[in-house]
Image: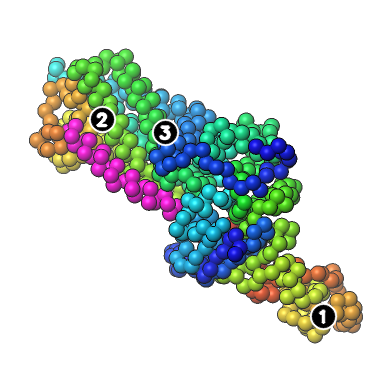
């Protein structure tokens, strides 16, 4: 620094030499800086954290205790709590991903996107930081749900590795879905719009699936939709990896017969399509 | 060559109500170390001009360079040498003042240590030490603007873009910000500033470009622009609206330009050639016509008059912000 630091924020010396150089190093550093910024927000608004912790507990308890007795009640081999867990995990992390959209819309509204876009940072860093932070928040929700589930008697039956595989599948899918929501978040005018819109999309997407009840118990048309619904493949994949199918038989469609591969392909496709679209969109957005 | 150069910039938006030519062949040139003020009403194209130059939007046609770097071909290069502060404070509400500035430093790739040091330095320079460790959420509008301006200065830019830096601020905060900007200019920073406030352009800018409908309609120093309008104005306010027509006739007779009538016809003003002599003559004629006056006097031309003379309409000063962004 200069020896004579006056009260004026001297700019005359001209720009600093950057310390971090190279495309990959700056991309990593920028992505981490924005992640740090977003996680700080969670730290400073405890309501968000409480929501991320309490809502999953509530859902696990409500669904298992309220519906548990009514669903599959006459089949002694069918344990609804075991069956439910993969479904409730999937629903919660997919809903958690919508936060990426609302947060992008909020950042645009507040004008900080304009600040980011006049900085020489990696074009994808804001999006990477956004989706990373939401992955972290979703991971917290996931851990809470697993602990709650274990406390009320849920058990995974296929060993720890297979169980972790199921968790990884859920996190991968939700991370990819964050990018879809981030794009929507940059296209809407207000954060409220994205909140309302995501409920309109996500309730049918998660309820017309095998998440809460076996697909064959749904009315015929819904049953067909459910068997091709990507969320069903995700739930079925996690359920099989957890060893929680409870004797239910997967429908005779390719996605339901190969649910893990379907969920992975779906996630990778979402990333391949929406990451470039998001980066392109980000290069053109400006506040208001 | 000037440090900021723009040639023939155009930008068109399609909106529901039709096509908007936000920029219609705008030329601009800002010599190094000077302050250029872009003056114009809402929707004139000021914000769009700044957003093209600070790489937020791409022009449809035309060229622009900042520090000899092309804004379209090398936006990252431009971003390294400029600082930008927008109409609304672009700060993160949840971060403290220090954290906001540290984040900006890290995104300039200064490294965490140097970013922290620079953040602290700026917080001190901007008299925000007491607030530096509190989330911006609790800051006043004036403090947010200061943080935002500090954010624009993190990388010691020699070129600064300020888009309506004081819109919405109270007079004391405005004056404070003006002084800060003046300090920067004394340090050699080149500033491109947009404003709707005529006194702001008058106070800060060495050169003013008056913009209307997406292009520059007049350029010069504040004094040069005022000289274009002519000398003094005579302004009278009649007590009774019914006298307005008659009073207008008298002013038109003595005046040397178009009449300007406002306040429901009660306030009438006109440019005159011979200041005091003409005022006397006007007052004597008004007296003979037995027109009661609420107020009468002479005014030196303001930039408002410049604007009126050049465009035929007043510089809008309502609170609406420019709706130019995509």
Image x and y of residue B187, in percent: 70, 50
In the depicted structure, whether residue B5 falls above or below residue B105: below
Q: Residue at x 41, y 24 (%)?
A: A54
Q: Is residue A224 left or right of residue B256?
A: left
Front residue of this view, candidates B311 and B202: B202
Mark seen at residue B262: none
Residue B73: give x, y in percent of width and height: 45, 58
Q: Mark 3 sits on what residue?
A: A133
* Quadrant of the image occupied by residue B33: bottom right
For mark 3, does the 10 Å Cα neighbourhood hold few (<14), some (14 to 19), or many (20 or more) residues? Answer: many
Question: What are the residue bounds of the magenta stretch?
Answer: A259-288
Query: Residue visible at 18% across and 34% down?
Result: A261
| Rendered-image quadrant of the N terminus of chain B | bottom right
Measured in 3D between alpha carbons, the distance from the residue under mark 3 to the one under mark 2, in whole angstroms, is 18 Å
Is residue B14 found left or right of B195 in the rendered image? Answer: left
**Residue identified by numbered label 2:** A169
Q: Cβ–Cβ below 8 Å for labels 1 and 2?
A: no
Instruction: Tell whether B114 sits left or right of A105.
Output: right
Horizontal and vertical percent position of residue B90: 56, 45
Q: Residues within 10 Å of mark 2 (few under 14, many from 20)?
A: many
Which image quadrant is residue A230 in? Answer: top left
Residues marked 1 and 2, same chain: no
Q: Quadrant of residue B264?
A: bottom right
Report in which chain the residue with disc 2 lies: A
Residues at marks 3 and 2 touching, judged by CB atoms closer than 8 Å: no
Indicate the secondary structure of the residue bearing disc 1: loop
Residue annotated with mark 1: B273
Q: Chain of mark 3?
A: A
- Whether residue A154 appears in this view of the structure is yes
Q: Position of residue B266 (x, y in %)?
A: 76, 72
Residue at disc 2, secondary structure: helix
């Amino acid at each position: 620094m200069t020896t004579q630091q006056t009260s004026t924020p001297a700019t005359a010396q001209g720009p600093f030499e950057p310390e971090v150089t190279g495309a990959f190093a700056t991309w990593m550093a920028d992505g981490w800086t924005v992640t740090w910024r977003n996680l700080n927000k969670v730290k400073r608004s405890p309501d968000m954290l409480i929501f991320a912790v309490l809502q999953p507990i509530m859902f696990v308890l409500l669904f298992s205790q309220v519906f548990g007795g009514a669903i599959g009640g006459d089949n002694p081999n069918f344990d609804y709590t075991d069956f439910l867990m993969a479904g409730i995990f999937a629903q919660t992390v997919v809903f958690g991903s919508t936060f990426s959209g609302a947060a992008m819309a909020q950042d645009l509204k507040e004008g900080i996107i304009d600040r980011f876009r006049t900085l020489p940072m990696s074009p994808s860093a804001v999006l990477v930081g956004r989706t990373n932070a939401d992955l972290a928040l979703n991971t917290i929700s996931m851990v809470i749900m697993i602990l709650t589930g274990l406390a009320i008697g849920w058990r995974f039956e296929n060993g720890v590795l297979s169980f972790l595989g199921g968790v990884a599948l859920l996190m991968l899918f939700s991370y990819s879905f964050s990018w879809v929501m981030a794009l929507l978040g940059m296209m809407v005018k207000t954060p409220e719009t994205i909140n309302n819109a995501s409920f309109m999309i996500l309730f049918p997407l998660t309820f017309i699936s095998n998440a809460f009840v076996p697909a064959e118990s749904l009315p015929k048309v819904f049953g067909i939709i459910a068997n091709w619904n990507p969320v069903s493949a995700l739930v079925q994949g996690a359920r099989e990896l957890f060893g929680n199918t409870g004797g239910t038989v997967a429908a005779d469609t390719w996605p339901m017969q190969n649910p893990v591969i379907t969920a992975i392909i779906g996630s990778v496709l979402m990333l391949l399509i929406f990451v470039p679209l998001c980066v392109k969109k980000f290069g053109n957005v400006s506040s208001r | 060559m000037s440090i900021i150069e723009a040639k023939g910039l155009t930008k068109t938006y399609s909106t529901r109500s039709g096509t908007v030519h936000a920029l219609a062949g705008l030329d601009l040139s800002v010599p190094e170390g000077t302050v250029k003020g872009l003056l114009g009403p809402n929707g004139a194209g000021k914000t769009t001009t700044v957003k093209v130059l600070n790489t937020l939007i791409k022009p449809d046609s035309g060229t622009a360079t900042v520090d000899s770097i092309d804004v379209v071909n090398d936006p990252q290069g431009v971003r390294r040498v400029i600082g930008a502060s927008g109409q609304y404070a672009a700060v993160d509400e949840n971060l403290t003042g220090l954290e906001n500035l540290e984040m900006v430093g890290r995104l300039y790739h200064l490294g965490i240590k140097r970013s922290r040091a620079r953040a602290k330095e700026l917080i001190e320079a901007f008299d925000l030490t007491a607030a530096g460790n509190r989330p911006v959420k609790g800051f006043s509008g004036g403090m947010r603007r200061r943080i935002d301006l500090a954010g624009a200065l993190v990388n010691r830019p020699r070129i600064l873009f300020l888009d309506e830096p004081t819109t919405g601020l109270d007079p004391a905060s405005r004056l404070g910000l003006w002084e800060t900007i003046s300090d920067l200019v004394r340090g050699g920073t080149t500033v491109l500033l947009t404003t709707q406030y005529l006194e702001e352009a008058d106070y800060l800018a060495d050169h003013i470009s008056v913009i209307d409908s997406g292009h520059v309609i007049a350029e010069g120093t504040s004094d040069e622009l005022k000289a274009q309008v002519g000398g003094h104005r005579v302004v009278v306010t009649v007590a009774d609206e019914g006298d307005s027509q008659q009073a207008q006739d008298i002013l038109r007779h003595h005046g040397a330009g178009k009449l300007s009538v406002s306040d429901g016809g009660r306030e009438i003003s006109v440019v005159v050639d011979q200041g005091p002599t003409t005022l006397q003559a006007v007052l004597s004629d008004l007296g003979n016509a037995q027109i009661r006056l609420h107020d009468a006097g002479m005014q030196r031309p303001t930039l408002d008059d410049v604007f009126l003379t050049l465009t035929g309409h007043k510089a809008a000063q309502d609170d609406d912000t420019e709706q130019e962004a995509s």
